[in-house]
Image: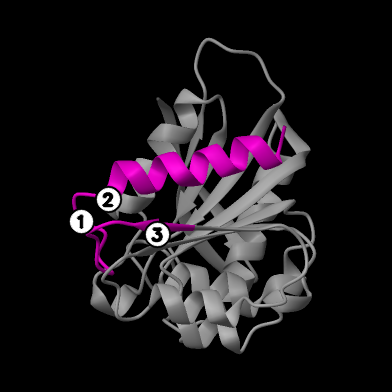
Amino acid sequence: MRQTAIAFKSGKLTLEGVLSVPQELSGPFPALVVCHPLPTLGGDMDNPVVTAVCRRADREAVATLRFNFRGVGDSEGEFNSGEAEQEDVKAALDVVRRWPGMDRKRLAIAGYSFGASVIARGLRRYKHARSLAFIAPPVAAVAKSAIAKDARSKLFVAGQHDRIAVPVELQGALDGARGPVRFAEIAGADHSLREHEQEVADRVVEFVTDTLS
């Protein structure tokens, strides 16, 4: 996987990220922005679920951008509980839209836990994303969002024993949602998804390649 460390602007702040572009293939490539879990619990762009998704995407000729939210790692700024972080996601999406070799009409966003909740809260900011993948999104974040009114293709992934993204509660919050909705329950997994990273990555990338084809 060919990876490039990049820096990009989110408002006045400079964020760090890693852009991965498929090797030995010619573009333009579909692209996926991947958002990491809660920074206050150690979440960053090197989270195992995030990196597993990026590696799997590379094998399917999908470019990826994973990045650190404001205040994480070498990204400037301070943690803002998911409010200002919505601008960070938009900025990352703008990067892949404008990056040479990317297909700006085939873009998707995925987020894990906190990253998923940021996407849910800022849906209207991400109009250039054709499809959305939510990995272990907190039920409360989904219930309070405008997801039910969003017509884009959506994937929700949750562990069987997740107490934050409780599968049955998550499915209930999605009743009546517009647009195609897929749901994948990972047997034996909790919110950490530890030892299930590859299965999660497979589900997410299969969804992305299908919806961006």
Question: Going by the image, does 124 lie left or right of 159?
Answer: right
Describe the element under mark 1 as helix, strand or loop. loop
Give the quarter of the image for residue 5: top left
- Mark closer to the chain start, 3 or 1: 3
Q: Do the residues labelled 1 and 2 touch (CB within 8 Å)?
A: yes
Q: Where is residue 81 in the image (x, y as percent from the top left)?
A: 46, 86
Closer mark to the observer between disc 3 and disc 1: 3
Q: Where is residue 173 in the image (x, y as percent from the top left)?
A: 58, 82
Residue 185 bears which disc, if any? 3
Q: Does 173 sit above or below residue 177? A: below
Q: Which residue is drawn at 25% across and 76% down?
A: 41
Which residue position holds label 2? 48
- Mark closer to the chain start, 1 or 2: 2
- 155 or 73: nearer the viewer: 155
Describe the element under mark 3 as helix, strand or loop. strand
Residues drawn in magenta: 184-213
Which residue position holds label 1? 194
Q: Position of residue 40 (x, y in %)?
A: 29, 80
